[in-house]
């Protein structure tokens, strides 16, 4: 009887600690809930990035799903991006200026690859690999596909822009500490959801 | 006692509900990373310092040692290892190359290793967009080549990959814990 009791007690202790922490940060300032950034140990070959890279597929979790399902078709698309975190900063209209280019990530320019032809806002987008970036405004984002592959996000050659799409933005119900890109299924395709801080944009992609 | 149990269950379910309130992906424990030959190609490119075209890039996730014994233990000798975490590790060549006298066409491949105590067999496989080595299919191998490994004096906490220039092209360096392997890639 002692063992389960102590487990439950520690659960309660853990829960109450977590609650206290959240409460105190709520009280100090709305946006100070940032996770502590641990400095990774030195690595002589390749240091760990502060803004880690990530990958999203459509169909959602395509590669992971292959562990348990036979996927009948190849993936439709994937995006590779790095995930900056808010760290208590105010993002839209502040860190990211309205009307200025935003690399939709960190480090390497974010890359989207279509493994088949798709249609975005009635325009055909050929299968292939593109750089994706954004110009945020208060009420809309302009999403741009660009041909300047394998580059660093801070300097994208806009003479290689291929097409651009305006999408509405909306406030999110939860705050996103880490910038997040993920695909979600919609009728006739999928949308690329791009969310950070309290704002998100969705780019519908049809196929 | 009953009350404590009920209270605990309630708190636990609230915590679980909280952690699931946003169904978008959390940050991975083993972060993804990318390396290139030439090293840091994108940075060189924006500084106009790239003197050679892009040859290769690797996309891999970086598990941490976390105090565990890695080779011969967590990563068993003689078994296919995913050389990473999460999504299968991917190597892409932007031109034809040669590995161990075998021509490798430009394109995307999944990279695995079969570690042994004093050498690793590096495997290039054409089944892409997969997860780890859980669905590894030997039939789809493009090549296997054995490379020697070297013991390191200083431990490497997170699996690391990088390229170094060689006389015939470049070597893909793979290091974790106290082991370093080097895969020669010929550009001649």
Image (cartoon, coloured by chain):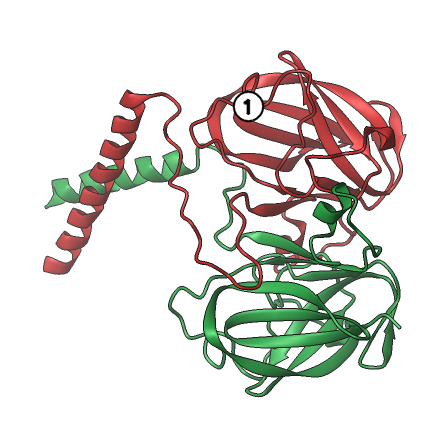
Chain colours: A red, B green
Left or right of residue A156: residue A181: left
Quarter of the image for residue B143 reads: bottom right
Packing grade of label 1 (10 A; few <14, some 14-19, many >=20) is few
User: Which residue is at 74% across, 52% downward?
Assistant: B41
Q: Residue furthest top?
A: A139
Q: Position of residue A175 (x, y in %)?
A: 47, 26
Q: Position of residue A54 (x, y in %)?
A: 60, 46
Q: Position of residue A118 (x, y in %)?
A: 84, 35
Q: Residue furthest bottom?
A: B118
Left or right of residue A20: residue B145: right
User: Which residue is at 40% across, 24% downward?
Assistant: A31
Residue A143 seen: yes
- Pointer 1 residue: A95
Left or right of residue B181: residue B2: left
Closer to the camera in the image, A101 or B119: A101
- Is residue B83 positioned above or below B146 on the image? above
Closer to the camera in the image, B7 or A178: A178
């Amino acid at each position: 009887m002692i063992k389960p009791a102590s487990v439950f007690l520690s659960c309660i202790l853990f829960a109450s600690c977590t609650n206290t922490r959240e409460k105190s940060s709520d009280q100090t300032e709305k946006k100070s809930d940032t996770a502590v950034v641990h400095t990774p140990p030195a690595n002589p070959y390749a240091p760990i990035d502060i803004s880690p890279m990530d990958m999203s597929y459509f169909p959602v979790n395509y590669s992971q799903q292959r562990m348990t399902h036979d996927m009948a078709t190849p993936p439709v698309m994937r995006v590779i991006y790095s995930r900056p975190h808010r760290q208590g900063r105010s993002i839209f209209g502040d860190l990211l200026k309205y009307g200025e280019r935003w690399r939709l990530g960190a480090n390497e320019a974010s890359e989207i690859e279509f493994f088949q032809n798709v249609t975005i806002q009635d325009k055909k987008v050929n299968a292939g690999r593109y750089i994706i970036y954004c110009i945020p405004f208060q009420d809309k984002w302009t999403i741009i596909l660009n041909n300047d592959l394998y580059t660093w996000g801070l300097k994208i050659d806009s003479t290689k822009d291929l097409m651009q799409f305006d999408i509405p933005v909306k406030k999110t119900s939860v705050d996103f500490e880490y910038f997040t890109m993920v695909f979600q299924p919609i009728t006739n395709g999928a949308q690329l959801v791009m969310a950070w801080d309290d704002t998100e944009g969705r780019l519908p992609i049809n196929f | 006692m009953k009350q404590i149990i009920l209270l605990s269950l309630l708190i636990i379910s609230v915590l679980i509900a909280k952690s699931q309130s946003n169904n978008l992906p959390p940050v991975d424990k083993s972060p993804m990373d990318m390396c290139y030959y030439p090293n840091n190609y994108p940075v060189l490119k924006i500084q106009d310092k790239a003197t050679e075209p892009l040859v290769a890039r690797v996309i891999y996730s970086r598990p941490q040692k976390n105090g565990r014994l890695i080779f011969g233990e967590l990563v068993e000798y003689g078994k296919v290892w995913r050389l990473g975490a999460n999504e299968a590790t991917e190597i892409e060549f932007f031109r034809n190359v040669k590995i161990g006298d075998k021509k490798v066409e430009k394109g995307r491949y999944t990279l695995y290793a079969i570690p042994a105590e004093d050498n690793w067999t590096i495997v290039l496989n054409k089944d892409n967009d997969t997860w780890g080595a859980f669905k590894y299919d030997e039939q789809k191998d493009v090549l296997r080549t054995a490379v020697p490994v070297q013991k390191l004096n200083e431990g490497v906490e997170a699996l690391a990959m990088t390229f170094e220039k060689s006389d015939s092209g470049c070597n893909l360096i793979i290091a974790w814990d106290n082991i370093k392997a080097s895969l020669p890639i010929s550009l001649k």
